[in-house]
Amino acid sequence: MTIKDIASRCGVSVATVSRVLNRFPHVHPALRARVEREIRRVGFRPNGVARSLVLKKTRTIGVVVADITNPFYSEIARGIEDQVRAHGYTSVLCSTDNLPKRQLEYLQTLLEKRVDGLILGSVRRREPEVAALAHNGFAMVLVNRSFRSPHVDSVVVDNYAGARRLMEYLVGLGHRLIAHIRGPLQFSTGYDRYRGYRDSLRARGLTPDPRYVVSGAFRREDAVVATRRLLELRPRPTAIFAGNDLMALGALEALAEAGLRIPADMAVVGFDDVELASYWGIRLTTMSQRIYEMGRLAVDLLMERIEKRRRERRAIILQPELVIRGSCGGQPISGGLGQGSLPLETHLDRAQLRRPQG
Amino acid sequence: MTIKDIASRCGVSVATVSRVLNRFPHVHPALRARVEREIRRVGFRPNGVARSLVLKKTRTIGVVVADITNPFYSEIARGIEDQVRAHGYTSVLCSTDNLPKRQLEYLQTLLEKRVDGLILGSVRRREPEVAALAHNGFAMVLVNRSFRSPHVDSVVVDNYAGARRLMEYLVGLGHRLIAHIRGPLQFSTGYDRYRGYRDSLRARGLTPDPRYVVSGAFRREDAVVATRRLLELRPRPTAIFAGNDLMALGALEALAEAGLRIPADMAVVGFDDVELASYWGIRLTTMSQRIYEMGRLAVDLLMERIEKRRRERRAIILQPELVIRGSCGGQPISGGLGQGSLPLETHLDRAQLRRPQG
DNA sequence: CTGAAAGCGCTTACAG
DNA sequence: CTGAAAGCGCTTACAG
């Protein structure tokens, strides 16, 4: 069933059918009604592929993240999906597992499919081919991670400032030997948070001891292993700054496994404030990002490029906020006080940060 | 840049360029090399939209779930994405928030985009339009939820049997007053699990008391509210069977808020075994589904329809398995024993159930 | 082995 | 207000 079939059944030209399909103003009401009736009757749906070919627009945007099962990315992806839909577009989502090869494959597929723009949440700090794409005028915005290239739009959080704020908090609590489970330095998130950690120590006149810094790929399991290593150190650290919430959860697991109490024997902080960081039984102290909102903002920037043909670069840098829960003291980590009853709970109105509940 | 540009630059016809692009066997090596060089030199990428138009194939499949930020669906989606990619296809993912209107909109968009097939994880028990689509021969498979229609492929878990098994377990632990936080009855998952709950009671000669059954939309927050209601009941239930893990987490939250100890004062079971059910601080006893695997299986069924032109229906019903952790006794729910050291841990080899870690 | 040409299902100047 | 026709960028019988 095509526009041509509808046309012949109605005794009009394909141009007319096309016009009623696209709600052109000057079609005779009688013809319009006749065509609309027929379209409804046979359940005709115009072929979007053909339409895209002539319009040179697919109304589709490509979204690339590291891993959709990571709650941080699923929340970003949801912000993107909702806002993309609000603009009348569709998004196609891809998970790279932080494999550069996989990222490249997905990018190529997306380009062949002629997406109108790209939102990338998976880039490394050095990514010359991707930067070149953007410089050639392809609509693109980076989210969460960014790279050094002054001509690409981005929406990120100030990871360096966040890390420094977190360290300040731990030091304020009396911690002097703070370990760091850092993310990969090839990502701006891992790099900037690590720099924040290091500079915080230096600012206090301390030389960062490399033995107290271990690495993981932002995954929970990595932090389990990393934490076991940290526990062998003497003197033992009294606090762990994990590179993200997932790794903080892994640290909690390893600490519990070793029989340590949290926060009495060890303080733990994360980064991101994914939703489950606030769950009962976890109650992680962490730096909060407005994750869902970042996804939406990325779409807004992209749409300015696509529809308003903006050419100047825009970079949005959000400030994260410290959310104090139970994993550093002040509150027992479990035993279950409700969120609202925590005197040390952040002043943030979380309802504003999360997506509206359906 | 099009195939035509490449052709004229190389002094060949577009047919030849098309043939080298599609790796046809009988192209003269010299020509092939010349064309390939030029393609590489200018960085040409063929237009997939045009290709799809003539081939009447987009190599894209539509995936509709209730909510990608729900870890159950993000794991299914990941299974789907990985397997779809293995088949050389792309998937486009949509979240309906369980809104029938949203589901319909997405379905229409997907059909206009001419996806080659559909995997639906969001359907209600009654869904005549969707069933009609399938009956008209459109390639489709239901995953997780299904509806009554003998001609649609599906991969689901045996929710009824799972619920009965869970109840058996609770009864075996000595519980006699078991409450249920059920999911919406319009979804097969909510419906079948509720039936299992009800029939288990009846099988013991008990009349299910409707006051001990409350509803939620499979969301954590819903269960917080529902559990508060259950706690007002006298006599108070001694166990709660939550319709899924997310709602079990909400129950844990509300119980902790009320100052109850788990499992000493109340046993809690969930359903699904999402990854975080096993995290430290949660350690939920639950019915385990092979979530990631279900996504992969759904793709395999779909590909049989699309590529092998299978016409007979195939329905895969998986058996869930009980995973005993800390939320019903046997183990403290927190205080952190590692998974491996739990004597009551399931015999399942979890590594087989989860996706491989990159 | 290679090319000219038709055709996939639309949109949109251009004429009338 | 309406229609004939060109064209979007490919693929693929069909001839040679």
Image (tube, coloured by chain):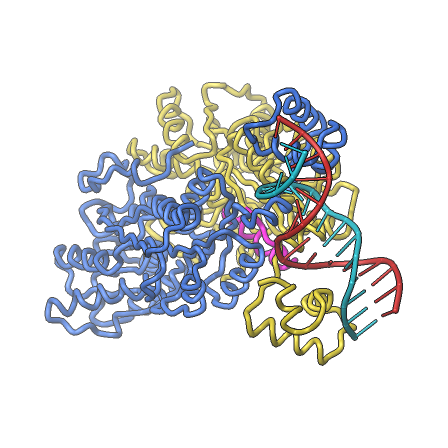
Chain colours: A blue, B yellow, C cyan, D red
Report which quarter residue B65 is drawn in: top right
Residue sitting farthest toward the left:
A205
Quadrant where the N terminus of chain B lies?
bottom right
From the image, give the main secondary structure of the stretch colored magenta: helix
Q: Residue at x 51, y 68 (%)?
A: A101
Q: Nearer the viewer, residue B161 or A314?
A: A314
Report which quarter residue B164 is drawn in: top right
Q: Is residue B163 visible?
A: yes
Residue B90 drawn in magenta: yes
**Coordinates of residue A209 in the picture (x, y in percent):** 21, 74
Q: Nearer the viewer, residue B295 or A51?
A: A51
**Coordinates of residue A310 in the picture (x, y in percent):** 37, 51
Residue A283 against residue C1 in the figure, above or below: above
Q: Nearer the viewer, residue A68 or B237?
A: A68
Report which quarter residue A124 is drawn in: bottom left
**Coordinates of residue A131 in the picture (x, y in percent):** 41, 65
Residue B38 against residue B238 in the figure, above or below: below
Magenta range: B74-92
Residue sitting farthest toward the bottom:
B30
Residue B169 against residue B292 in the figure, above or below: above
Q: Nearer the viewer, residue B195 or B221?
A: B221
**Label total for image:** 0
Q: Is residue B333 visible?
A: no
Residue A234 drawn in magenta: no
**Coordinates of residue B302 in the picture (x, y in percent):** 69, 47
